Image: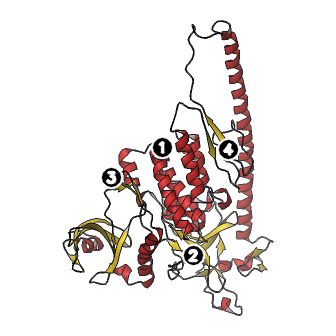
Amino acid sequence: MSDDPQLAHCTARIGTVLRGKWRIDSLIGVGGMAAVYAATHRIGRRCAIKILHPEIAVSKELRARFEQEALAVNQLGHPAAVNVLDIDTSEDGSPFLVMELLEGESLGKHAHDAGGIEERELLRVVSTVLEVLDVAHGLGIVHRDIKPDNLFLTSSGGVKVLDFGIARMKQGGSNVRTRMGSMLGTIPYMSPEQIAGGQVDGRTDIFAVGATMFRVLARRHVHEGSMESELLIKMATQPAPALRTVAPSVSPEVCAIVDRALAFDLPRRYPTARAMREDIERVLGANASPRAPATVSIRADVSPAISVDGPTIAAPAPGQAMQVSMVAPVPPQSAATSPQAGSGSPLLMIAVIGSFVAAVCLAAVFFVVRSRDSAEDARESAGDETSQEDKAIGSPRTMATSSGTSTPPSAASTSTPTATAGPSSTRRPAPDGKYRLLIKDGRYPFCVTSKLKQAYPVRTNDEGVKVCSGTPDGPIPIDELKSYHPSEFQW
């Protein structure tokens, strides 16, 4: 018998019959919210049944979120979204979904078992996923949990997008709200704005698609950490590394697509799933005939252009497409057929030497520019840390409070709340020294505990006050938290 009570409870359902018609045959998997089974209808039809855990089913909000998966998929009507056939409640009161039973494996398992995936195969999978997301985003549905385990490769060669259970919907799902302090998604694939608890839109899913491609191609996550809180901080404050720096074997065209999908700043990211899919289809089309010269255009839209081959390719102006020439090598002519076989050799040698010298010069210029940029980044980082340290020790400068007024930092860092009129008079004080506020470049603030054991998002409560939400001590007003310096590991 299993030592896990939840697993034991899920396994005990095998062999039972739901609503007198669905016989549970086997357990496919168990997740945080539900268990998935293979089942057979009394007329012989095979299906998958997803049953919400009883302890989750007691929450009206989580039941609604579970049931909205059927609503979201039904609105999509896309063949690459897993089909939901029915929704009902079991005899013990647990809601369940009846879905099509898929044969195959997830993208994550396939990549792990095969030791990686060929570029073109991954591009074809992602193109289908983006097609589904384009339809979903057009209906106001944001998936919010795109990852390798939610992309299923069927044995017939198709692709299915799974788990719309935590999707955010503009219509039909307005009764489902995120609880204070909760973050829906999987951290290694979450966008910075999603981690910060801000507004999400289709670009959140685009970031997750880029993180999925990064994971498969580089065989590592965008950011990695030994603790969940450390990973949370990195995902919220640090841009993704360029894919070519960790996976140099990946083609420049694919690196450019992944890097743009993972852009830290929203304006630099792909604006729509369709725009990203168009770039992928261009690369697939250009690579279809490797012998023919081809030009691949990577869309720039309103964002700055992305260079896909270092300093040797000029960056186009905003709004223009970037041209990446891919010319197949031409077989050399034989001495008998070449008209300049004898006399052209010295000229060829001179041309080769000249090209080598030019390449060396370009490389030197590139490294000089990179060194200068690195020095500027270091100075900016030092300036950020100095600014945060000033706030922590009580600089003469003022700090903006959540109400929009300015007060001395000493007042903002005290753990004793200031009595004010109105809603702010009910603010809960922070336990002295237990929480601190970390702000990177003035954006994406969140609260951390000593030794970074836990991190909590910042949100604006119903009274318009910014609070550190989800803590065991309740919502803590931001203007009563102590500042946290990045160089400190604990306090």
Which is more N-terminal, label 4 or label 3?
3
| 356 with respect to 242 (left or right) | right
Q: What element carries label 3?
A: loop
The picture places residue 350, in percent across and down from the top left corner, at 70, 15
Measuring 44% from the left and 70% from the top, which residue is drawn there? 73
In this figure, which residue is indicated by the disc labeled 3? 155
Q: Gap between marks 1 and 2, in whole Å? A: 47 Å
The answer to whether the residues at label 4 and label 2 have Cβ atoms under 8 Å apart is no
Q: Nearer the viewer, residue 86 or 305?
A: 86
Q: Which of 128 and 347 is in front in this view?
A: 128
On residue 119, the disc is 1
Measuring 70% from the left and 13% from the top, which residue is drawn there? 347
Which is more N-terminal, label 2 or label 4?
4
* Screen quadrant of the N terminus: bottom left
Amino acid type, callout 3: Ser
The answer to whether the residues at label 2 and label 3 have Cβ atoms under 8 Å apart is no
* In this rendering, the label closer to the viewer, 1 or 2: 1
Quarter of the image where one finds residue 479? bottom right
Q: Gap between marks 3 and 1, in whole Å? A: 19 Å
Relative to 135, residue 304 above or below: above
The picture places residue 218, in percent across and down from the top left corner, at 49, 46
Amino acid type, callout 4: Met
Residue 247 in view of the camera: no
Measuring 53% from the left and 42% from the top, which residue is drawn there? 285
Q: What element carries label 4?
A: strand
Relative to 186, residue 284 above or below: above
On residue 322, the disc is 4
